[in-house]
Amino acid sequence: MTTRTIELSDALLDYVAVHDSSRDALITELIAETRAALPDEHDMQVSSEEAGLLAMLARITGARDALEIGTFTGLSSLAVARALPEGGRLICCDVSEEWTAVARRYWARAGVADRVELRLGNAAETLAAMPAEPLFDLAFIDADKVSYPRYWAEVVPRMRAGGVIVVDNVLRAGRVLAPEDEPSRVVAAFNRQVLADPRVDSVMLPVADGITVARVRTVGA
């Protein structure tokens, strides 16, 4: 037994993936295609276990309206969209038509394209143009790290009470401990900001590159 999160070997990661009921042949194919087609960028894809966690959170919270900031080739959006109920919707914000074209193919193959609305452009501007009222039950932030504080400022007021926000890459491969690059400095400050935010309860988990899961206590700014 241990009081610390154990280090995961490749074999143990594979074991974890096998025991994820949300992972199927389509998810496996998307992961493989992204690695093969984008060898220099595939690390931008969320981990398999993170996608499974997002799907589980969507189901646990009974989310009907979800938001994603940073879609890439669509693994996280595919997981969330499939977990939404009939009539649910997921708004995806991204800047790349090329990468999200892959996501579109997989949404269609999964039969959830009608649940997903892709909005291409600057995500902060896309959010600012939305009604300033509670719109979402679940949100996932995984885009430009320097913009995390602005994303947070735009997302929290648009969450319903009890809604859940998941933020990726909050550990920056350990660089938050002694941040030297700007993205790591911003994320380290952002982590302190979330912890001090009275509108949410939050927990940081050592999943992949670190995620924060925050539950919104109150509605509004």
Image (cartoon, rainbow, N blue to C red):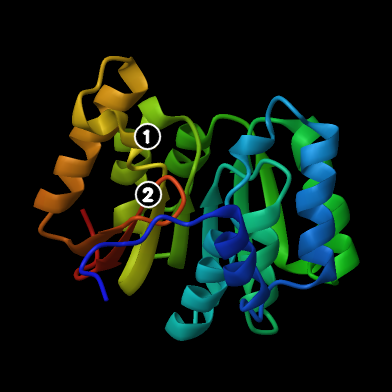
Q: Quadrant of residue 75?
A: bottom right
Alpha carbon separation for disc pair 1 and 2: 8 Å
Q: Secondary structure at mark 2?
A: loop
Q: Position of residue 198 (x, y in %)?
A: 10, 58
* Pointers 1 and 2 in contact (C-beta within 8 Å): yes
Residue 198 in the figure: left or right of residue 171: left
> Residue at point 52% right, 77% down?
56
Q: Position of residue 118 (x, y in %)?
A: 70, 48
35 relative to 132, above or below: above
Q: How many marks?
A: 2
Amino acid, disc 2: Gly
170 relative to 85, above or below: above
> Residue at point 26% right, 67% down?
216
Residue 135 in the figure: left or right of residue 93: left
**Viewer-side residue, 191 vs 65:** 191
Residue corresponding to mark 2: 210
Q: Quadrant of residue 27?
A: bottom right
Q: Position of residue 8 (x, y in %)?
A: 47, 57
Amino acid, disc 1: Arg
Task: Pick out the residue farthest to the front.
Answer: 1
> Residue at point 52% right, 57% down?
67
Residue 15 in the figure: left or right of residue 138: right
**Viewer-side residue, 122 vs 194:** 194
**Viewer-side residue, 74 vs 117:** 74
Residue corresponding to mark 1: 172
Circle 1 packing at 10 Å, graded few (<14), some (14-19), many (20+), is some
Q: Position of residue 147 (x, y in %)?
A: 38, 30
